[in-house]
């Protein structure tokens, strides 16, 4: 028996529309060749965002979420522990992205790019399904960001094995970059669909696959206290590149707190965000206009919106 469709509410506020609903239902209803780019940070099979795991997170109990210790008087944000995923979780993850990639391939225009956040431990569950669905892999965007993932000594034996690290300390976050094949040459596709390439940083500098990006902190996190919040300084560079002629629609199928939609709005670009969690949808509704107005701190290679 098919699960009931869930589209509970929609808010349009130029230049964006946000939807509280199931993105798979939304994508099935969307017109073919109607979206020009995707920029998203998915929940990886929804494991870490199930009510059970979110409850543990809110209570500070951990579960799949690692609750880092306080450091220098500051409490660090929780991060998901992908090492605890089971084989059944891996299988569900693979199917999740197979369905997503297939639906996105239909709604995206030829030449549309997909920027999708992932993790070195699970990226293969994302990349394979997108390639199988007919997307071209166009590389990876490497976000250099210092986090508290990895670098730990063996659990309950840290003194005995003081010189041992179980796995490398993570200093980067990969974003898979895919493109729906163009119709003809890139120049032909740009003329017809406005897609096929990436907007340059400037006349002298092309868009690059290495972006220095500090974690979201301070006022950004106060405005949008989502556990996977990405900073505006990073997202504005991505959305700007995603629409090379500054025309078309960017989709974030897993909107969360609305940070991608806010970045698009700050850059004067049209976007649609879909979020199944009602609490996060309400957070996004409040946060998007505030995040969009924030000035961003320039980092190496950053383009100020």
Image: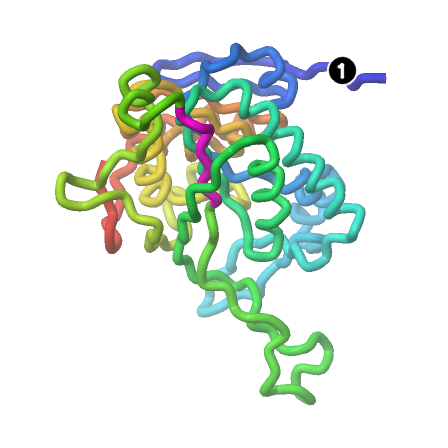
> How far from the left and from the top, in percent, is residue 282?
53, 25
> How far from the left and from the top, in percent, is residue 253?
54, 27
In reply to whether residue 142 is colored magenta, the answer given is no
Q: Which residue lies at the image location 29% right of the left edge and 31% below the top edge?
A: 293
Is disc 1 surrounded by few (<14), some (14 to 19) or many (20+) residues within 10 Å? few
In reply to whether residue 180 is colored magenta, the answer given is yes
> How far from the left and from the top, in percent, is residue 112?
41, 27
4 and 61: which one is in front?
A: 4
8 and 151: which one is in front?
A: 151
Q: Which part of the image, by quadrant, shows the C terminus? A: top left
Q: Is residue 59 left or right of residue 282?
A: right
Q: Which residue lies at the image location 52% right of the left edge and 69% below the top edge?
A: 169
Q: Residue furthest right?
A: 1
Q: Which residue lies at the image location 49% right of the left edge and 40% below the top edge?
A: 116
Span shown in magenta: 176-182
Check the image and report above or below for 107 versus 297: above
The reply to whether residue 234 is in sight is yes
Q: How is the image coloured?
A: rainbow
284 and 167: which one is in front?
A: 167
């Amino acid at each position: 028996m098919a699960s009931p469709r869930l589209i509970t509410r929609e808010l349009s506020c130029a230049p964006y529309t946000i939807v509280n609903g199931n993105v798979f239902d939304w994508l099935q209803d969307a017109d073919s060749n109607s979206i020009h780019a995707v920029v998203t940070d998915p929940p990886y099979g929804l494991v870490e965002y199930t009510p059970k795991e979110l409850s543990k997170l809110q209570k500070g109990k951990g579960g799949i979420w690692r609750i880092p210790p306080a450091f220098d008087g500051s409490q660090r944000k929780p991060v998901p522990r992908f090492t605890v995923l089971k084989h059944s979780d891996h299988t569900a993850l693979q199917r999740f992205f197979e369905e997503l990639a297939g639906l996105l391939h239909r709604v995206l225009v030829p030449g549309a790019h997909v920027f999708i956040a992932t993790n070195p431990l699970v990226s293969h569950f994302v990349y394979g399904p997108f390639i199988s669905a007919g997307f071209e892999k166009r590389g990876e965007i490497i976000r250099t960001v210092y986090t508290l993932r990895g670098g730990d000594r063996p659990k309950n034996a840290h003194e005995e094995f003081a010189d041992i690290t179980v796995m490398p300390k993570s200093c980067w976050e990969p974003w898979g970059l895919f493109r729906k094949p163009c119709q003809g040459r890139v120049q032909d596709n740009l003329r017809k669909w406005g897609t096929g390439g990436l907007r340059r940083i400037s006349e002298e500098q092309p868009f690059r696959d290495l972006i220095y990006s500090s974690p979201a902190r301070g006022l950004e996190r106060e405005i949008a206290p989502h556990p996977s919040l990405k900073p505006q300084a990073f997202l504005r560079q991505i959305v700007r590149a995603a629409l090379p002629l500054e025309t078309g629609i960017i989709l974030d199928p897993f909107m969360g707190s609305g940070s991608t939609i806010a970045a698009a709005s700050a850059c004067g670009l049209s976007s649609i965000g879909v979020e199944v969690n009602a609490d996060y949808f309400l957070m996004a509704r409040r946060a998007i206009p505030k995040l969009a107005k924030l000035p961003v701190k320039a980092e190496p290679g950053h383009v100020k919106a």
